[in-house]
Image (cartoon, rainbow, N blue to C red):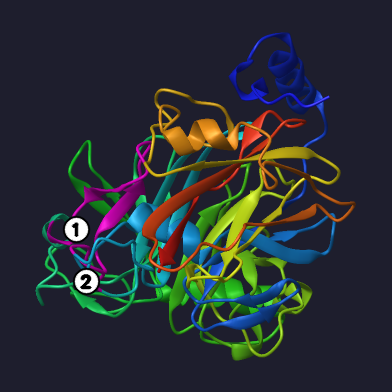
C-alpha cells in the first residue's frame, strides 16, 4: 500500500514517534563537519563545499548537506537565472528539537555573491539565505581595526550569545587574548548581542594546553577551526595543528580530551576540518545528493539519499521553493517545496521515480528520466520518509538543455 499523502498526517503516529525518541537512550554524539579540501569518502567524493557527519553506529562518515542543497539555498548569485554552487562553509551551527532541524547558521570562507566571509547567515524556512549578523556588525562589536574579518568557528549558545573564532589574528580595541590589543586566531571569544558585550572564552594558549593534554604531548594548535557544544554544554573544538589531528574533535573536559580522532573518520588522504558542529549520532532524516547537478540533454540524473535503514520514501519535485513555516515537520525543517506547483502534484502520482526505499545500510537511489534537448529549467527535489515522518534535505537540479 502506498501512502502518497501521509506527509500531511501529524496525529497519533507522529506523537508516538516523538515519544519513542524522547524516551530512548541518548545516542552517541559525533562531529558534523566540512573540509578545507575535497576528500574520498565511503560514498565517493566529499567536496569542500559540502558537509558530512560521522555515524558512530555505522562507524563511518555519511553525507549531510550536499552541493545541490547549497545551491537550493544559495540561489542565483550570478544573475543567469540558474542556481549556483556556494563557497566552502567555514563555520556552522545547527538548532535542533529532538528529531527536527529548526535552524542552520553558516559562514563562508570567502565572498559569495552578496555574502562576505564575516557574515553570519541562516538557512531560512523559505529556502533562501538570510543575513543574521553582518561582517560590519562583528567588526564593530569586537573593535577590530583592519576593516574585515573571517569567521572560522561559530556556536550559538542557548542564551543567544555567539561564540566565535577568527581566521586570522585581529587587532582589537576591545579585547586582548595572547597579546595586548590582539585577538589571536586560536582564541575563542563571545559576543552577546542582547547586552552588546564581548569577552574571551579561551585564549589560544589555553586551547594549546587542552590539545596538548588530550594528545599527551606538547603542541601548538595555531588556529581554532571549529567550535561546538556537546549535549551537556561542554565546549568542543577543532584545530589546525598538528596535521595528524586537524580533523580531530577535542572537548574541554578533564583538561582537554579527544571526542573523536581524525583516524576514526576513515577519510582518504589528510583531511582538515573547516566547519564543526557536534550532533546526535543517529540519522533522523534523509540527506540528498544529485549527480550530475547540471544535467545536459538526454542525460539521466541520479538522486541519492542516505539516512535510516529500510524506510519507505517519496521523492517530491517542484519548480518553486515553498516554506517550511507553512508545512513544518520532523527532519530537515519541513516541506521546502511548493505544494501548489503542478510538478509537485505530478510527483505525488505514480511516476516511476516517486517511490523508493532505503536498504539495510540506509541508502536509496532514484534515476530520473532524461530530458530532451531544449529544456532549460531549475527543478527542486526533496524526499519524504514515510516511516520516520520526516523530510530530507532539498536539492536544486539544473536542466541545461
Q: In which quarter of the image is the C terminus?
A: bottom left
The verdict on residue 124 being magenta is yes
How crowded pointer 1 is (Cα within 10 Å; few <14, some 14-19, many 20+) is rated as: some
Position above or below: 290 against 388 = below
Residue 228 image position (x, y, % from top left): 52, 55
* Relative image position of residue 254 (x, y in whole percent): 68, 60
Relative to the observer, which residue lies in front, 30 or 357? Answer: 357
Q: Mark 2 points at which residue?
A: 149
Q: Position of residue 6 (x, y in %)?
A: 67, 21
Relative to the observer, which residue lies in front, 187 or 341?
341
For the residues labelled 2 and 1, the Cα–Cα distance comes to: 8 Å
In which quadrant of the rendered view does residue 43 lie?
bottom right
Q: In this view, does 60 lie above or below 126?
A: below
Badges 2 and 1: C-beta atoms under 8 Å apart?
Answer: yes
* Residue at 71% from the left image edge and 22% from the top image edge: 18
Q: Is residue 325 visible?
A: yes
| Corner quadrant of residue 87 | bottom left
When the figure is inspected, residue 158 is found, relative to residue 62, above or below; the finding is above
Q: Name the residue under label 1.
A: 138
The boundaries of the magenta stretch are 111-136
Is 105 displayed left or right of 149 in the figure? Answer: right
Q: Nearer the viewer, residue 201 or 141?
A: 141
Amino acid at each position: 500500500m502506498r501512502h502518497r499523502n501521509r506527509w500531511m498526517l501529524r496525529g497519533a503516529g507522529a506523537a508516538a514517534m516523538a515519544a519513542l525518541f524522547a524516551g530512548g537512550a541518548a545516542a552517541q554524539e559525533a562531529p558534523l563537519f566540512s573540509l578545507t579540501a575535497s576528500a574520498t569518502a565511503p560514498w565517493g567524493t566529499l567536496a569542500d563545499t559540502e558537509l558530512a557527519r560521522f555515524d558512530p553506529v555505522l562507524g563511518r562518515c555519511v553525507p549531510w548537506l550536499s552541493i545541490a542543497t547549497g545551491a537550493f539555498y544559495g540561489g542565483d548569485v550570478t544573475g543567469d537565472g540558474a542556481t549556483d554552487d556556494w563557497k566552502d562553509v567555514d563555520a556552522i551551527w545547527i538548532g535542533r528539537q529532538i528529531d527536527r532541524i529548526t535552524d542552520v547558521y553558516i559562514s563562508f570562507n570567502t565572498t559569495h555573491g552578496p555574502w562576505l566571509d564575516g557574515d553570519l547567515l541562516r538557512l531560512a524556512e523559505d529556502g533562501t539565505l538570510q543575513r543574521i549578523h553582518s561582517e560590519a556588525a562583528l567588526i564593530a562589536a569586537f573593535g577590530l581595526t583592519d576593516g574585515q574579518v573571517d569567521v572560522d568557528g561559530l556556536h550559538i549558545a542557548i542564551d543567544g550569545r555567539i561564540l566565535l573564532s577568527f581566521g586570522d589574528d585581529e587587532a582589537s580595541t576591545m579585547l586582548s587574548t595572547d597579546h595586548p590589543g590582539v585577538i589571536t586566531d586560536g582564541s575563542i571569544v563571545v559576543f552577546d548581542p542582547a547586552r552588546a558585550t564581548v569577552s574571551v572564552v579561551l585564549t589560544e594558549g589555553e586551547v594549546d594546553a587542552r590539545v596538548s593534554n588530550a594528545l599527551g604531548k606538547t603542541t601548538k594548535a595555531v588556529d581554532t577551526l571549529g567550535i561546538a557544544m556537546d549535549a551537556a554544554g561542554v565546549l568542543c573544538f577543532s584545530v589546525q595543528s598538528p596535521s595528524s589531528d586537524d580533523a580531530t574533535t577535542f572537548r574541554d573536559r578533564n583538561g582537554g580530551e579527544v571526542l573523536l580522532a581524525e583516524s576514526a573518520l576513515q577519510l582518504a588522504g589528510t583531511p582538515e576540518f573547516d566547519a564543526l558542529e557536534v550532533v546526535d549520532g543517529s540519522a533522523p532524516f534523509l540527506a540528498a545528493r544529485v549527480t550530475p547537478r547540471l544535467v545536459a540533454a538526454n542525460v539521466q540524473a541520479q538522486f541519492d539519499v542516505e539516512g535510516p535503514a529500510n524506510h519507505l520514501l517519496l521523492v517530491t519535485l517542484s519548480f518553486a521553493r515553498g516554506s517550511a513555516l507553512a508545512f513544518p515537520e520532523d527532519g530537515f525543517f519541513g516541506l521546502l517545496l511548493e505544494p501548489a506547483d503542478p510538478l509537485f502534484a505530478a510527483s505525488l502520482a505514480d511516476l516511476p521515480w516517486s517511490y523508493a526505499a532505503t536498504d539495510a545500510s540506509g541508502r536509496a537511489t532514484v534515476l530520473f528520466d532524461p530530458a530532451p534537448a531544449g529544456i532549460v529549467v531549475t527543478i527542486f527535489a526533496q524526499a519524504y520518509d514515510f516511516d520516520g515522518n520526516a523530510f530530507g534535505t532539498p536539492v536544486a537540479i539544473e536542466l541545461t538543455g
